[in-house]
Amino acid sequence: MKLEMKQARRNLCWPRQRLSFSRRQQARRSRPRSRSASAAPSELNLHERKFLELARALAARPRLVLLDEVLSGLTPAEVNDAIGLIRRIRDRGATIVFVEHVMRAVMALADRVAVLNYGKLIAEGPCEAVMKDPEVVRAYLGTLMLEVVDIKVNYGAAPALWGVSLQVHSGDLVCVVGPNGAGKTTLINTIAGLQAVTAGALRFNGRDISRLASHRFCAAGIAIVPEGRRLFTAMSVADNLTLGSFVPMARAHRAATLEQVLGLFRC
């Protein structure tokens, strides 16, 4: 029985053909080096398990290697190791197709990039050219919604913001951080039209709104939830919501909008 098991192990990776010495060496160099070969996969960390999967694939002597997000979850140092390993595998003649979101790995390894969006191929070609393709930029980043361009804001003669630039694409969630007094609320109030721009520009959906009156910001589609509670306490919840939907762009669909808003907060 032991003899049969040994023979099965010899023939496991390639029917009726044992791996050549060079192939065995290649697989060994690709597997985790910090553990012994007798270690169980459950004893390996994520980095080592990914390398073990890759080594097992190489043991099959493939002509084409398919890598599906093998870098996900790795630390920057581990990503560097993986990039070096994949490059060595490729340099030895393997053809590789890989799906990856770690862009520095894509730029470091790929000869060509093919970009899919909702099942459709939208771009294909050299890395640098594809990364600059307008359709690829829209697919990854969305359209540019808000652009803060080198703005300066003063309170009287005292500067509160100077040289601030920021871009926000549709679908983004951008967080502004900083210590007290850094200008975070001033920036938000400026974008909302509650604080005048001293210099620079604000663009919303391609339109310069820097010099618009405050109520025009709201009509353009910008809403603010201020730091302090600003509710009409003498009015009901329903009346406060109705007042919020009074701008022209919301008024025509008020009933449906209020139903959606109420649905978000129902328990």
Image (tube, grey):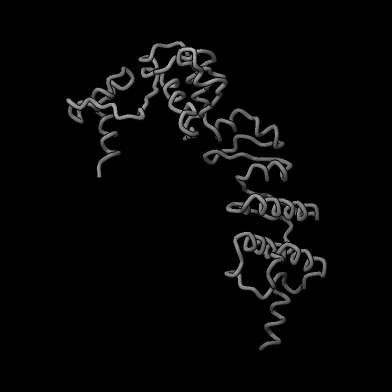
Q: Position of residue 23 (x, y in %)?
A: 79, 66
Rendering quarter of residue 127: top right
Of residues 10 and 22, the one nearer the viewer is 22
Residue 9 vs 33, above or below: the answer is below
Q: Residue at x 82, y 66 (%)?
A: 22
Name the spot of residue 144 as percent of width and height, x first.
Answer: 52, 25
**Residue 131 in view of the camera:** yes
The residue depicted at 58 percent of the width and 40 percent of the height is 116
Identify which residue, 73 or 123, lies in the foreground: 73
On the question of residue 206 being in view, the answer is no
Q: Specify the quadrant of the image occupied by residue 214.
A: top left
Tell me residue 206's x, y (percent): 51, 18
Front residue of 178/36: it is 178
Q: Is residue 60 left or right of residue 254?
A: right
Q: Quadrant of the N terminus?
A: bottom right
Furthest residue to the bottom? 1
State which quarter of the image contains the C terminus: top left
- Above or below, 61 relative to 253: below
- Report whether 149 appears left or right of 78: left
Does residue 100 appear to the left or right of 31 in the view shown?
Answer: left
